[in-house]
Image (cartoon, grey):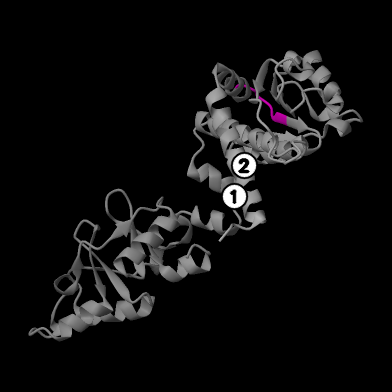
Amino acid sequence: MNAHPDLLAARRVLDTEAEALHALSASLDEGIVRAVEMLAAVTGRVIVSGMGKSGHVARKIAATMASTGTPALFVHPAEASHGDLGMIVRGDAVLALSNSGETPELSDIISHSRRFALPLVAITGRAGSTLARAADVALVLPSVAEACPMGLAPTTSTTMQLALGDAIAVALLTRHGFSESDFRVFHPGGKLGARLTRVRDLMHAGSDVPLAPKTMPMDRAIIAMTEKRFGCLGITDSEGRLAGIVTDGDLRRALDAEAPLLGRTAGEVMTRAPRAVAPETLAAEALRLMNERSITVLFVVDAAGAPVGILHIHDLLRAGVA
C-alpha cells in the first residue's frame, strides 16, 4: 500500500531539516567558542533580536537562556527604533538573528551596539551580509534548501537558528555551573517544578517523626506508631542513628513468633537497616525508590545517619510528583 501524500510530505520536511542540522553541526568551528565566551562574560543581559520568523525564534532563545541561568530578553527591532533601544545598556550583549543578514529593521540595534561597544553575535545565513560584517562574531548557517517545496517559506533556516540558539544556551548553562537546584528556582510551577523538589521541602520533621529507641517495650511502641499515623516507627540506636523500622508487617510477623509480642522490645521486632534518603534527595528519586521497593514511607537521615524527617507517598502525590 502506498503511503499517504501527507505522510510523505511530512517525512520529507523532517528528513530535510535533519540533514540541515547535521550540516550545521559539521560546520561549527572556533566561532561558536568565541560567541559563548563573549556572551558568558557580559555583566548585564543578552539582548536577542530578530524580525519576522527570526523574531519568533529569537523570543524562544531568549526564554531558554533566561530559564537556564543567562539573563536575557527579547527586544523587537522595530520597537527598538521607537524608544526600546533604551532597554539595551552598557554591560549587555546583542545576539541578532537574520537569515539574509540584511534585515533593515535591525540596523538601529546594530548601530546602537557599535556605538556603545556592546558585544554583537550574529546568526545569519550569509557570511558577506551587513549583519555578519558588523558583528564581533558571525555564526553562519550552512547553505541548505528550505523544506518548503517552493524553497521560500522559512523552515530549514529557522530550525537551524533555533537549534544553534539552544546549543549556545546549553553551553552557557554548562559554563555557569547551572544545577538542578538552580533550575527549580526558575521553574517552580507545574510538573517539572514538582519533580525538582527536594525531599527536605516535603518531609515531616521534628515531633511529627515517629521514633523510638531499640529498648522501648512493644506495648509502648505500638502506641507511638498509632499516635503518629504513618503506619511505622523508626528505631534508633544508643547514638541516635536510624537502626531499623517497625511496620504493620513486622507486627503481623511478630504475632506468629513463639515469643509474645508485648514482651519484646522494638529492637527485637524491627527490620534492620531500612532504606533512607538524605534531605537533598530529589523528590522524584524518592518516588522511584518507593516504587522499586513497594513501600509507602522513607525515613530521612542526616550525614551521621540520624533521622531528621519522614516522607510519605501521599506527600509526593499532594506535591504533584507522583
In the image, the segment drawn in magenta is 41-47
Where on the picture, by quarter, is residue 73? top right
**Which residue is label 1 attached to?**
187
Q: Is residue 207 visible?
A: yes
Q: Are the residues at dot 2 and dot 1 in contact (C-beta closer than 8 Å)?
A: yes
* Badge 2 or badge 1: first in the primary sequence: 2
Kind of residue sitting beneath label 2: Ser
* Residue furthest out toward the right: 82
Q: Quadrant of the N terminus?
A: bottom right
- List x then y, in percent, for residue 264: 13, 79
Give the prevailing secondary structure in the magenta stretch: loop
Count of number-bearing discs: 2
Where on the picture, by quarter, is residue 227? bottom left
Tell me the SS state at disc 1.
Answer: loop
276 or 180, which is in the foreground?
180
Residue 45 lies in the magenta stretch: yes
- List x then y, in percent, for residue 299: 33, 62
The crowding category of the residue bearing disc 2, from other C-alpha atoms within 10 Å (few below 14, some 14 to 19, many at least 20), is some
Residue 103 lies in the magenta stretch: no
| Residue at the image point whose x is 13% and y is 82% from the top | 263
* Residue furthest out toward the front: 1
| Residue at the image point whose x is 58% and y is 22% from the top | 32
Is 231 placed left or right of 94 in the picture?
A: left
- List x then y, in percent, for residue 86: 84, 28
**Which residue is label 2 attached to?**
67
Q: Is residue 84 above or below residue 107?
A: below
Where on the picture, by quarter, is residue 103? top right
221 or 322, which is in the foreground?
322
- List x then y, in percent, for residue 109: 82, 24
Is 105 placed left or right of 150 in the picture?
A: right
| Residue at the image point whose x is 81% and y is 30% from the top | 87
